[in-house]
Image (cartoon, helix red, strand yellow):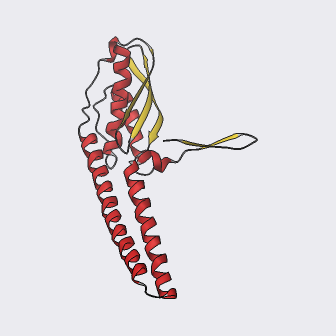
């Protein structure tokens, strides 16, 4: 989900990376929980200032209950998202592809799981991988950035099933899968 903000002079694009990295249910449940927490707090403040009417207390209790329910739903959404991500990353199978029969050229491949995605350009020349450029990698932060070293390892060893980068295993596997997709696209 990308958002663009326009001005009169020129167009400015702000990519809200957080929205691209998390399931919408996490944001939705978090926003609703925050709303009810704020509503319950304001209502509680009003009870203290105005008085303790039965209706005000009932509204306050309902808002507090809904806050708790949406906090629990938010935590559940996060846990489901993380579990889904781990299962998707665990299911990536990295196999070698015989590059010697692939025509010279630059091939583009992509792969994505819940929290990680990669887009690569793989250059094949004279039956070997001569370059792998990672054109897009999410998240490209301190957790995923070390995995980009796997591109060099694949090029140097001329095979895709190289060891993953410690501490960035899932990002490494996603980059490997993107390379596989690029080369399979060349074969097909």
Quarter placement of the C terminus = top left
Res. 109 image quadrant:
top left
Residue 71 appears at what percent x and percent y?
Answer: 34, 65
Q: Is residue 157 above or below residue 165?
A: above
Front in this rendered view, residue 47 or 33? 47
- Look at 37% across and 28% down and name the residue there: 179
Residue 130 appears at what percent x and percent y?
Answer: 43, 23
Res. 8 image quadrant:
top right
Q: Is residue 183 above or below residue 139?
A: above
Drawn side of residue 100 relative to residue 95, left or right: right
- Look at 41% across and 13% down and name the residue there: 126
- Look at 40% across and 45% down and name the residue there: 146
Front in this rendered view, residue 48 or 81? 48
| Residue 74 appears in view | yes
| Residue 140 appears in view | no
Q: Is residue 86 above or below residue 95?
A: below
- Look at 34% across and 33% down and name the residue there: 176
């Amino acid at each position: 989900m990308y958002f663009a903000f326009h001005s009169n002079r020129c167009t400015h694009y702000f990519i809200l990376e957080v929205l691209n990295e998390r399931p919408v249910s996490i944001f939705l449940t978090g926003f609703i929980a925050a709303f009810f927490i704020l509503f319950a707090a304001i209502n509680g403040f009003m009870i203290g200032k105005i008085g303790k009417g039965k209706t005000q207390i009932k509204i306050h209790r309902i808002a507090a209950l809904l806050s708790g329910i949406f906090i629990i739903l938010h935590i559940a959404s996060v846990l489901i998202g993380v579990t889904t991500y781990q299962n998707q990353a665990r299911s990536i199978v990295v196999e070698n592809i015989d590059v010697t029969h692939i025509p010279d050229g630059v091939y583009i491949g992509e792969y994505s799981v819940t929290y990680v995605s990669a887009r690569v350009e793989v250059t094949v020349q004279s039956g070997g991988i001569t370059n792998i450029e990672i054109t897009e990698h999410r998240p490209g932060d301190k957790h995923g950035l070390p995995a980009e070293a796997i591109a060099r390892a694949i090029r140097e060893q001329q095979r895709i099933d190289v060891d993953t980068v410690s501490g960035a295993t899932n990002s490494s596997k996603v980059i490997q899968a993107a390379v596989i997709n690029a080369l399979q696209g060349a074969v097909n």
